[in-house]
Amino acid sequence: MQKMLYFRVQNLYLLIFRPYIARNFRKRNNLKIYYGCGANFQKGYINVDIRWTPTVDLLANLKWCSRFFEGRCQEVYLSHVLEHYNYPGKNLLLKKGTILDALNDVNKMLVNGGTIRLAVPDFHTLSELYISGGQPLFPRLTGRICGEQNYPQNLHRCVFDRDFLALCLEKSGFTDLIEWDPEELGFERDSSFDCIGDVKTSLNLAAKKSSAFDI
């Protein structure tokens, strides 16, 4: 009953309130979007998610954002979101629902030279922690690799190390890759801060849009 009520309220929002709220952003440019904010909030960003939480400014999926915000964003930030999209296969094919599809949507949202800011679970570091015996697989590594799966969307479908994430970004029209530190940027705490003890387990990369998607 509670779940049914939640979806009814969400559908009411999408039909009635989202068009009204979206009008506030329609004529603005050089926007900064925090997509997949969950219960987190970043000041100076439009906080967007597909699930309603008290911190959400706009309830929408990434495909909707790619159309509504097309060519109007200075920065799009995704913190521990990309791993929820499907692996694109060894040929890196652009198919619906894959990580390349998500990166293509972000590419559309950004102005030329705009920034994509990413944080994903660092599979290389998590693997090292497991192999070295520093951490057992359960409970602290399992959720970071597979997703906590405590609601339907919280399932991880892909893993990343730096090389693979960089390759996907480069294939998606992004260049000038750099690592970034959320604490240095004054971010509010979210998944980009993730660590086990003093070992950072979030891979944080940013890049600039240089071209449209080229696959």
Image: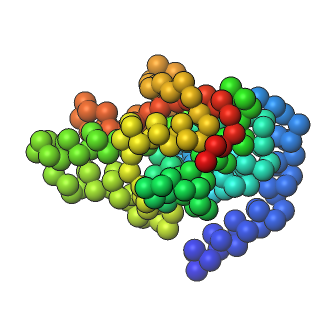
Residue 134, given in percent of the width and then of the height, sits at 14, 42
Is 177 above or below relative to 172? above
Q: Residue at x 59, y 60 (%)?
A: 95
Rendered image coloring scheme: rainbow
Residue 174, given in percent of the width and then of the height, sits at 59, 33
Residue located farthest toward the left when viewing the structure as drawn? 133
Residue located farthest toward the bottom when viewing the structure as drawn? 1
57 sits left or right of 139 in the view:
right
Question: How many numbered marks, from 0 up?
Answer: 0
Is 78 above or below relative to 12? above
Q: Residue at x 39, y 57 (%)?
A: 147
Could you tell me if residue 179 is visible in this image?
A: yes
- In front of the other: 44 or 158: 158
Residue 78 location, quadrant: top right
Q: Residue at x 54, y 36 (%)?
A: 170
Residue 7, given in percent of the width and then of the height, sits at 65, 71
- In front of the other: 20 or 114: 114
Q: Residue at x 81, y 65 (%)?
A: 15
Is 214 above or below relative to 187? below
63 sits left or right of 185 in the view:
right
Residue 203, given in percent of the width and then of the height, sits at 39, 36
Could you tell me if residue 52 is visible in this image?
A: no
